[in-house]
Amino acid sequence: MNKDLLIELGTEELPPTALRKLSEAFTHGVVEGLTQAGFETGHVHAYATPRRLALLIKGVPASQPDRDVERKGPSVKAAYDAEGKPTKALEGFARSCGVGVDELVQEETDKGAWLVFRSNEKGRPLADLLQGIVEQSLAGLPIPKRMRWGDSDAEFVRPVHWLVLLHGAEIIAAQIMGLNSSRETFGHRFHAGGALALPEAGAYAEQLRSDGFVLADMDERKKVIRQQVEVAAIELGGQVVIDEALLEEITGLVEWPVAVVGEFDVEFLQVPPEALIKTMQDNQKYFAVLDAEGKIKPYFITISNINSKSPEKVKAGNERVIRPRFSDAAFFWNQDNRQPLDAFLLRLDQVVFQKKLGTTGEKSERIAKLSEYIAQQLGVEAKAASRAALLSKCDLMSDMVGEFPSLQGVMGRYYALASGEEAGVAAAIEEHYLPRHASDALPASVTGQIVAISDRLDTLVGIFAIGQKPTGEKDPYALRRAAIGVLRILIECRLDLDLEVLIAQAAELLSDKVDADNARAEVFDFMLERLRAYYSDRGVPIDAFEAVAALRPGRPLDFDQRIKAVSAFRALPEAASLAAANKRVGNILKKSQVEVSVSVDTGLFQEDAEKALHKQLATLRPEVEALFDAGDYEQALRRLSALREPVDSFFDAVMVMVEDEAIKNNRINLLAQMSALFLRAADLSRLHQQE
């Protein structure tokens, strides 16, 4: 009979940030083990709290299903000797099957007669297999360092204290990590006194909730915490700041969440709110509260793991510990502001960016010069970009960023404003770190975009020049992320810049440190590969990317316009035929031994089809070339789709490779003219036919 199966391992407090990963791995390992053993299972529900890993599986049978076993033995010819007696091969086969020779059956096949062993193997009980399955799952958990406790040889991420194995109402006897299985679980460390006897597996979560003060479901607990802090913030007349990583961590810290509101002195509001919020989140695991205008309020919300009879004491205790933290933040803020931001420039010269590439101060000077160059290319004011780039790394030397590295850029903006720098310069200092990851926001200002590009290109060219490009999964300088960041800014912020030119400029600025010229082509190729990944993530077919990449456009914005044009073109009914024609023309041009000319002699035309193609090309060319010159690739290709009929007719009626050299070369030149027009956008011969 199928029954619910409960497995619970009780532990000391597990690492909160690893709790979900441990739970998922444990559940996967057990389910996979049961499946491999032939057990059919129903719905699986994982549970995880700081003190337990558990799972409840619906509808697990008491034993494996019986199965028919068939083993093929020797052929009849090889099974008996000339006197009809069993050979050693036959006797050995029967012995390996645990039966006598006479219990084997003969089977006729198209390759002759063979002796076969058949039996029905009884399924083994779940009780005999579960211990091994659980042990195998525990052994496979992603635990970098295991520990021992007491005089036991057992090893786990934390000491274990109880083990529950229930199939329905029955205990499955087992010994795992030195623990004998039982039906006794334990509730909250403080709210539930002793052991809780589970009557049956399905009662697990509800009994822990009602008698044990434990919300065993991690997702439910997370939802409850979110609701509690949101309600608490509303009661304070504000809204809570929920960092998802913090919410996940707190969920892994408590079994019975209770929101507690605390206050802090308004004098601390002089400190930038990001620093206060970071202090709350990183040091105390508190949630911050903002008002309707997004300004921080002098409150915090913490999640207690107990439903205290004296909540005011819990509140006072948390208020007491946050004060020295905020005092430190205020000290850092005041100390850093004792000098202007540019005073930190001298300290940057004492920090090595990379041994062969110089100090962070030297890097700042390079990106300032590159930023000035890019600003000139874009026709925008260069002074702000140069200044923002020069100051962009200064806050790394501040006490606040030393304490909270993730505030780099954010604090630079505050210190720049406090030092009297222009608002645009201050904003760019913060923005130049964007995007931090593939889906992150981009710098909002042109100045921020310029500095972000310069910073990343200096790193890319420099690291490639010293031979430390990414290999496999190793990318210590995050060059892949840097490349995607540059490409996203150029494309999505619509900056029409030539990437190869920018790489060359970055290489020149590095010339007093390394010979970066040899790395230029390699960096460009690397960024083209990143561009492949960029478009792949956006659902662009690989052949569309390759059609454009074959021409190696140097301007990513131009590359993007071509990609969009090719994607639109391939949706046209004429696309497949013209792509095939371009491929055919490409093959003809490759095989041709003559030097292709753009001139065509109409006097050598013999067929109406070649005359018609030439006429259509002559009609379309002025308009299409003007569209290409204007960067309107989509409309140009749409107009070129009118060539489908004359091109198809040409290949149906005209033999290109005729014996007459003049006529042959003239026809090749005509096809070359057509191909050259399409190649203004992309190599359409690389497009695959779509079904």
Image: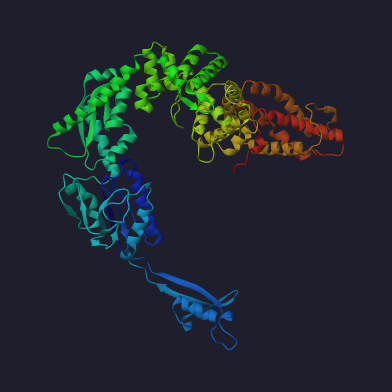
Q: Is residue 30 left or right of residue 516?
A: left
Residue 295 in view: no
Q: Quadrant of residue 413?
A: top left
Q: Quadrant of residue 356?
A: top right
Q: Foreground residue, 688 or 66?
A: 66
Vertical comparison of 138 with 561: above or below: below
Q: Residue furthest front?
A: 350
Indicate the position of residue 120 as horizontal and vertical percent values: 41, 73
Q: How many marks?
A: 0
Q: Name the image quarter holding the C terminus.
A: top right
Q: Foreground residue, 534 or 629?
A: 534
Residue 103 in view: yes
Going 53% across and 84% down the picture, which residue do you hit?
86
Q: Is residue 176 left or right of residue 676?
A: left
Q: Foreground residue, 232 or 465?
A: 465
Indicate the position of residue 125 as horizontal and vertical percent values: 33, 67
Q: Is residue 215 left or right of residue 373?
A: left
Going 47% across and 26% down the picture, which residue do you hit?
352
Q: Foreground residue, 672 or 552?
A: 552
Indicate the position of residue 618 as horizontal and vertical percent values: 74, 25
Q: Residue furthest left?
A: 309
Q: Residue furthest bottom?
A: 83
Color style of the picture: rainbow
Going 29% across and 20% down the picture, which residue do you hit?
331
Q: Residue furthest right?
A: 660
Q: Name the image quarter holding the N terminus.
A: bottom left
Indicate the position of residue 600 as horizontal and vertical percent values: 80, 27
